[in-house]
Image (tube, grey):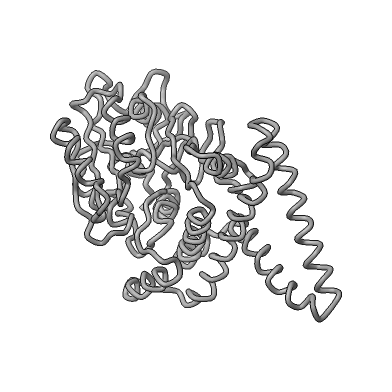
Amino acid sequence: MDMRDTKLYCDEEQLRPGERWWNMDSPPFVSVVIPMYNESTCIRECLDSLISQDYPVDRLEVLVVDGQSDDGSRNLVLELAREYGLIRLLDNPKRITAAAMNIGVQNARGDVITILSAHSYVAGDFISQNVAYLSKTGVACVGGPIHSISRSFLGNAISLAMSSPFGVGNALFRYSQKEQYVDTVAFGAYRRQVFDEIGLFDEFLVYNEDDEFNYRLRKHGGKIFLTPAIKSFYHTKMSLRQLSKQYFRYALGKVRVIQRHPEVASIRPFVPFTLVSVLLISGPLGMLSPVFLWAFLSLLASYLTVSLLFSLRISARNGWKYLSVLPVVFACLHFSYGLGFLIGLLRLGVRPNHQNGAAYCQILTEASGSLYRGKN
C-alpha cells in the first residue's frame, strides 16, 4: 500500500497557511526511545537534556531500553526515573540496537516517536521543533544534522572528519545546514502511524537498522525532512581503534542492507571499497609488475593529496593543530569502511534470510568482536 493513500503524509505545499496536523493547544504526546549499553559517561547528560525540554512535561515520556549494562548505567537511569516520572527503564535481553528500538516502540504511548542515542544530548527545543516540523511539513519523519563533539584533541579531530563530506560522503545528516528532503536522518522523529504501516526495525540487521527502516519508509511513499532547527549533539569516538571498529561494523551492516534491498545501493559505500580493493590487489602485484606498482603508487598518491587538501581546508577554519592528525583520521574512516565492506561481500556473499539470521549475527560477532552496537 502506498502510504500516501492513508492521508498520513502530504507535501509541504499541500498544507494551507497556518494549517497544522495537531491542535497545538493540546500538543501530541511524544515518546523518546533510547537504546543503551554501558553509557555511564553519557546517559545522564542525555537524560538531563530531555528533562529540560521546553515541551510540556505531561506530554512527554522517555524510554531507556538497556542491553544488560554492567557499568552502572542502569542505576543512573533508575535514580533519575525515581525523581522524574517521565523516565522509564526497559530491558533488552537480545542486546542488539534494533531489538531495543522495537521494545521502545512497542511500549511507547506517543503520537510521535523519536529515536535517540544514549551517546548524545539535545537542544532545549529539540522536541518542540520536531513536533513543529512534523506538523508544518506533513512528512513522515523529521530530523536535524548532528553536531559531532568530543572531550579530547583526537576526538575533536574525529568530529571534524565526521562532519566533512570527504570523511562521510553524502551523509547529509552529519553536516548539512540546509533544509531539504533526505534519504535518512540520525535521530528521527516519526509519526506513530509509520510503524503501523511499515512495521518495526529489522532485528536481523545488527547494524544499519535505521537506514533500512528509512528506506522502507521512502519506498512506501513517506518523506524525510532535514532541518538545522532541530539540534542534537553526538559524542564521537575518542580513539582511532574505536573509530575503525565503528566504521568497519557500519560497512558490514551496509552490505547486509544491500543484500536485502539491492535497489538501495549507491556509489558512496563503493568508493572506499574500491580504494581498498585496488590497493590490496595492486600492492602485492606491484612487486611483480611495474604496471601494478604504478597503479598502486598513483592511487595512493592521489588519495593522500586529496586528503591533505581537505585537511588543510578544515584546519584553516578550526585550528592548524589538527593538520597533522586529520589525514590519519580520514584514512582510518575510509580504510576501515572499505575493508569492512570487502569482508562483508566475501563472508556474506550468500543472501541471508529470516531463517539464518542467527548465523548472520554470529558472523558479525566473529568479524567485529562485539554483537551489541548503539549509535555511538
Q: Residue at x 68, y 71 (%)?
A: 280
Compared across the picture, whether 357 is left or right of 70 comes to right
Q: Quadrant of residue 119?
A: top left
Q: Residue at x 33, y 36 (%)?
A: 46
| Total numbered circles | 0
Compared across the picture, whether 25 is left or right of 3 comes to left
Q: Tell me residue 49's x, y (percent).
A: 32, 30
Q: Residue at x 28, y 57 (%)?
A: 99
Nearest the eye: 350 or 96: 96
Q: Tell me residue 300's x, y (percent).
A: 75, 60
Q: Quadrant of residue 319?
A: top right
Compared across the picture, whether 237 is left or right of 42 comes to right
Q: Tell me residue 168's x, y (percent).
A: 58, 48
Q: Quadrant of residue 114?
A: top left
Q: Residue at x 22, y 22 (%)?
A: 26
Report the residue that reaches farthest toward the right: 290
Q: Tell me residue 350's x, y (percent).
A: 47, 77
